[in-house]
Amino acid sequence: MTNDFTTYRQETGGRAFLLFLLFGLAIYEFVNAGFSAFAVVCLSPLIIIAAYAAFRYRMSGFWTLFFINYFVQWFSKNNWLPAGIPMSLYNEMLEILLLGIAIIDARRTPHFERTANLMLYTLLIWCGFCTLEVLNDTCGLGINIGAWYQGARMMAFQIMYCFLVFSIYIDNAKVLVQYLMVWAGLSLFTVFWTWKQIHIGFTAAEGAWLNNVGFTTHILNGGTLIRYFSTHNDAANFGICIASTAIAYFIFALTSKIKKHRIIFLITGLGSTWAMFQSGTRTAMACLLAGILFYVVLSKSVKIAVSVGVSFGVLLFILLFTNIGNSNQQVRRMRSTFDRSDASANVRTINQETMRKYMKEAPWGIGLGMNIENVPANNKYARMSSIPPDSEYVFIWLRTGRIGITLFIITMLIMLGGACYITMFRINSPSLRGVGAGFCCAFVSIQLGAYGNQILMQFPNCLLFYGGLTIVYILPFLEKEWIEYEAKEIAIQEEKARLKLEKKKASRV
């Protein structure tokens, strides 16, 4: 018997025995803890394989994080994810895994010095404040560690994870170009899915959501106007995200010297702009215009300022003083962005007036994680925990008070100011400066969107736009390699053009 077991161990390494133990553990968890724990145990071999792949192929984990972050809301809406697992857990576990790999592999990843910048220091201040919020007992319910961590993780810690991962893994010019291309590809798929919803229809799960949860906000004008949401959780998140994406890619297209890149970037910008209108999100229009105007400042170019200013003025004139496009309901809805008498657009203001009465006595807010399920109905602040904030800034104000929202605004302005300084004064390459400007303008756009809608910490926005701002801070480290990469691509481009011209001349003879 002993010899048989020894032979088995040598031949199989105990793999079958390990699988048997996992099977037993899965059954035990199913009986004692339910299906969610059973599913986690069953998935553990895949987790181990994923961890091994991430160690062996470092960038595979990063691209997996980027892909899952972009589509996790879509997967969840279509019931393609295991039930009972929080959506944020996928991002968080991948980010922690990537940071763990970077620490273990520190000798091969000498990029930690890139994290010591203004953005890190401001994030430490914001994360430190959110950590102190664990002591906030405004509601008089005692300290709730679980609720606090849930709130702090989504409001602060995920930004820090994102900053560290992007600082370490966007480590050369080639990866940066790949990042821009992957983001363009995912955005174009979202544009395609919008077209698919319009012309082919919704999936069964999307239709069920639209006719139940989204009925009052996404089916308007007696059912004649549908606000499309594509791969996002709702139309507001979709419209603002895709508008901010459009701004970035228009700027990338305007400043890139490589023809094939310009074409891809321009197609992405145009497609994203079209998709923005299909969302019927009025704030998205303001975000698009704000991002364009901000680029005029960053460009430091009179030529760009004049051309953008004229284009902006013409568009604004059409929206404000003409009826062009009024036959399209989505255009009419966008035009109502500028209508101060629009009733639905002013509901948020009315809600905020109610909030101010309560928040006068809560300078530190009602506490992170203090949502309707954690605050009893007879509590003084129960209404504040359940009232729709309709704005990320209002949501932060409710949870952290006037002290917290003031600190948040200051830290965001400092981070943006530092990124703009780098873009304008520390980068010499015009095309790389365009990359920095695109990310800065997209960040301005998403922040404006967060003022009007609760979308800033939603998927995929936090990773996309805080990650983009992080990239701006590491651009000076990449500039030399970027110039070399760009020179090689331009040489290839010119050689192809020369051969094409010679072939054309030869065909005439």
Image: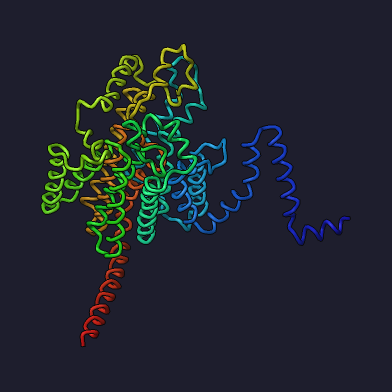
Q: Nearer the viewer, residue 347 or 410?
A: 347
Residue 496 relative to residue 26: left or right: left
Look at the picture and state if 27 lies above or below 435: above
Q: Which residue is drawn at 37% across and 45% down?
A: 198
Q: Which of 402 and 503 is in front in this view?
A: 503
Q: Where is residue 431 in the image (x, y as percent from the top left)?
A: 25, 58
Q: Position of residue 107 (x, y in %)?
A: 48, 57
Q: Position of residue 71 (x, y in %)?
A: 45, 46
Extreme residue toward the right, this view: 1
- Asked where in the image residue 28 lies, by quadrant, the reply is top right
Q: Which residue is drawn at 12% across and 43% down?
A: 313
Q: Which of 348 and 27 is in front in this view?
A: 348
Asked if residue 123 shows in the view, the reply is no
Look at the picture and state if 208 lies above or below 253: above
Q: Position of residue 371 (x, y in %)?
A: 45, 23
Q: Which residue is drawn at 74% across and 48% down?
A: 20
Q: Residue at x 40, y 31 (%)?
A: 215
